[in-house]
């Protein structure tokens, strides 16, 4: 290992050179051993941490099935910690919490409006003020609304959820609560307080949003076809690209023609009288009609906002 150069030396020089080579070889072996030890330690740590995460996840899921509220809340917040610390478990935790909400807060009534003997639609009773989801359902929704912002292949599935009186107000969170791209088809959000929430891209087809507080909420690109928004508060809400085809917007508060100028509306969209007769809204309706007639709806890009009439 010393090579020919050392072999040509004699006496003291040869001995010193050989000692230097031996020390270098030993140092190399020592360094390799240290690196191997570090790699082994890191691998052991990762396996141990993975095992701890799995154990915590299993324990938290088990708590969700408890008949004790305190244990269910502990399970929900335990899953939040797992999701925060382990990006690999993000999708799984979101799926578990979504399923928990769907199974424990599912609408028991028919989403379609009841009809009388003459076939006419009857108004559905509005829940009393103070009606709200149970503590564990509210906690699960809040955890989903403040989850880490990571790429998600699937939508958060909250279809048919009974969420009357849900409170997700931006001033109660460090950042606006986020249910963007959530699947809330036929969900009951009557009297929900969603002021300042991020609901961009959410699917609210047929949802009950009567008397919901949506002031300053972001509803850009939201699909709200056939949603019931009677009595809802929409002051300063953004609705760019939102689909309101067939939606019932009668008696809404704070809704303006400028907001509707960026939405998709049709002849079935029910508006307050002062907006139904607004020239700006009429121009928007004509633009949306032309867009549909040209079969551009499959492009998923709504027509650009309409300029004020005149």
Image: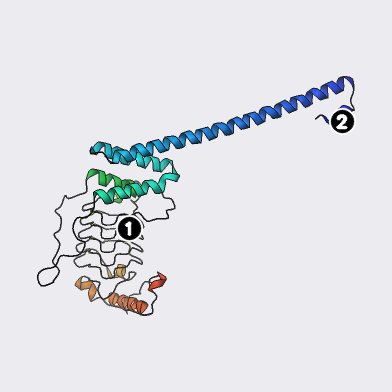
Vertical arrangement, residue 292 with respect to residue 240, above or below: below
Q: Tell me the residue at 31%/39% (across/down).
A: 62
Vertical arrangement, residue 70 with respect to residue 96, above or below: above
Residue 23 x, y percent position in the rendering: 74, 24
Q: Tell me the residue at 74%/27% (across/down).
A: 24
Quadrant for residue 285, please give it: bottom left
Quadrant for residue 200, please give it: bottom left
Residue 70 x, y percent position in the rendering: 25, 36
Residue 136 visible in the snapshot: yes
Gap between marks 2 and 1, in whole Å?
76 Å
Residue 168 visible in the snapshot: no
State the residue in front, 248 or 152.
152
State the residue in front, 232 or 120.
120
Residue 151 x, y percent position in the rendering: 44, 53
**Local secondary structure at mark 1:** loop
Vertical arrangement, residue 36 with respect to residue 126, above or below: above
In the rendered image, the quadrant that contains the N terminus is top right
Residue 120 x, y percent position in the rendering: 13, 71
Q: Earlier in the sequence, mark 2 or mark 1?
A: 2
Judge the density around disc 1: few (<14), some (14-19), many (≥20) Cα neighbours within 10 Å: many
State the residue in front, 224 or 304.
224
**Local secondary structure at mark 2:** helix
Picture disc at residue 30: none
Judge the density around disc 2: few (<14), some (14-19), many (≥20) Cα neighbours within 10 Å: few
Vertical arrangement, residue 205 with respect to residue 99, above or below: below
* The residue positioned farthest toward the left in the image shown: 117
Quadrant for residue 75, please give it: top left
Residue wearing tag 1: 183
Picture disc at residue 5: 2
Q: Tell me the residue at 36%/48% (across/down).
A: 94
């Amino acid at each position: 290992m010393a090579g020919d150069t050392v072999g040509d030396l004699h006496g003291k020089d040869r001995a010193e050179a050989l000692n230097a080579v031996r020390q270098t070889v030993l140092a190399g072996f020592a360094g390799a051993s240290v690196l191997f030890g570090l790699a082994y330690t890191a691998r052991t740590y990762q396996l141990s941490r993975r095992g701890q995460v799995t154990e915590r996840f299993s324990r938290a899921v088990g708590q969700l099935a408890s008949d004790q509220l305190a244990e269910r809340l502990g399970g929900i917040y335990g899953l939040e910690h797992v999701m925060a610390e382990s990006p690999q478990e993000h999708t799984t935790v979101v799926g578990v919490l979504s399923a928990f909400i769907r199974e424990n807060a599912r609408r028991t009534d028919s989403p379609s409006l009841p009809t009388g003997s003459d076939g006419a639609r009857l108004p559905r009773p509005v829940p009393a003020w103070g009606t709200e989801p149970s503590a564990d359902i509210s906690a699960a929704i809040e955890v989903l609304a403040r989850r880490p912002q990571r790429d998600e292949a699937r939508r958060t599935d909250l279809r048919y959820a009974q969420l009357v009186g849900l409170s997700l107000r931006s001033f109660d969170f460090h950042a606006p609560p986020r249910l963007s791209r959530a699947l809330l088809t036929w969900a009951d959000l009557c009297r929900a307080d969603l002021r300042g929430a991020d609901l961009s891209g959410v699917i609210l087809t047929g949802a009950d949003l009567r008397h919901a507080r949506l002031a300053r909420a972001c509803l850009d690109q939201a699909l709200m076809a056939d949603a019931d928004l009677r009595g809802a508060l929409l002051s300063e809400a953004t609705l760019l690209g939102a689909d309101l085809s067939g939606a019932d917007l009668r008696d809404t508060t704070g809704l303006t023609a400028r907001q509707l100028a960026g939405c998709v509306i049709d002849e079935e969209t029910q508006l307050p009288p002062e907006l139904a007769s607004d020239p700006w809204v009429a121009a928007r309706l004509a633009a949306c009609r032309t867009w549909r007639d040209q079969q551009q709806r499959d492009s998923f890009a709504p027509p650009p906002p309409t300029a004020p009439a005149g």
